Image (cartoon, rainbow, N blue to C red):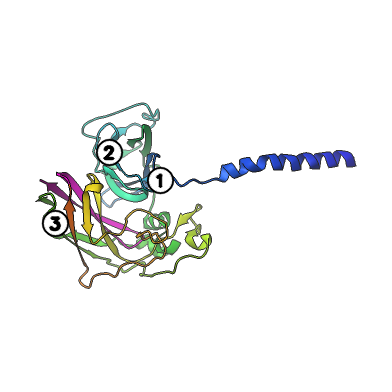
Amino acid sequence: MRLAARLTAASVALAAVLAWPAALDAQTRFMFLRGQSVHPAFEGWWPNDDGTYTLWFGYMNSNWEEQFDIPVGPDNYFALAEAGEMDDIEVDRIIASDIDQGQPTHFYPRRNPFLFTVEVPAEFGEQELVWTLTTHGTRNRVYASLRPDYRMDTQVMSTEVGGAFGSLDDRLRENQAPNLSIEGTLRRTVRVGEPLSLRAHAVDPDNYPPRANREPPKTLDELYSTRGVGSVVVSGAPGLRMMWTVFRGPAHHVRFSPEQMKAWMDTRVWGNSPWSPPYILPKVPGDNTWVADVTFDEPGEYVLRAVASDGSNFSYENLTVVVE
């Protein structure tokens, strides 16, 4: 019996030693700068007072540096389908009236959550709104539906983006998005190399969550929060901020002055992102008006997006610029 026990113990120990490299491989995490694909994301839905529903979308670009420009078309399209109709990733359903739902055509690195919304009617029922993206020859797809487990509110939104340093305060359920407006017309024309002045006004109507800064984290536990969300979510700084991004059109031809804070979740230290330590947001202008200039290196039609956030909730407004 003792010999058998010793042999069993030895066998277990040997198995553990042999399994150790595999365990290490299973836990390895790589940081890809380029070469990976973009995954569309369905963030969830909530009901509107008029009986319609708002669906929230974003995406995950697995690269830390590579950006993509994917025109609306066969590589970047929406389709309205019956439940399960497009489960086969090779099945296409390209209908001209459905493909453009206001999705981006420029894709920044990493996670870009709660980026745009699509409103569907009260009779949407069990249908699915399917978003298909193809990058580096890889097709990825997401299925938006009104399934009960996808229902969300502003507290869910905040926890998904690590808002207010990962707070789960119940007041986040009533958190109001900033009021945002772009001064001037929303379609303009400019020449290549000619600066275009941008002015946007943003106010946080409830001043919640309260603005706060935080020193750079000293440990991974300080950087990430798992409180109540069931997975590791990086923390973000609370407080009103406003930034310009390129929503449609090649961003490498666009220059903002001053340089804009990133709206995507760059978690690297000094990454110029609300999710990047140290968490020190620029001061809000005295009149709540953010002013910037933008110039374009190449002609074309671009859609710039003003993004206002309190760190937990978002507002957007688009400006179309025709560059001659």
* Magenta-colored span: 298-324
Say which residue label 2 marks: 70
Crowdedness near tag 3: few (<14), some (14–19) or many (≥20) residues, C-alpha within 10 Å = some
Magenta segment: does it hold 302?
yes
Rendered location of residue 40, percent (x, y): 36, 41
| 229 vs 220, nearest the viewer | 220
Magenta segment: does it hold 116?
no
- Select label 3 or label 2 by which is in front: 3
- Where the N terminus falls, by quadrant? top right
Say which residue label 1 marks: 33
Which numbered disc, 1 or 3, marks the residue that appears first in the sequence?
1
Residue 94 shown left or right of residue 151 in the figure:
left
- Type of residue at label 1? Leu
Q: Are marks 1 and 2 in contact (CB under 8 Å)?
A: no
Say which residue label 3 marks: 196
Instruction: Specify the quadrant of the image occupied by residue 273.
Output: bottom left
Under circle 3, the secondary element is strand
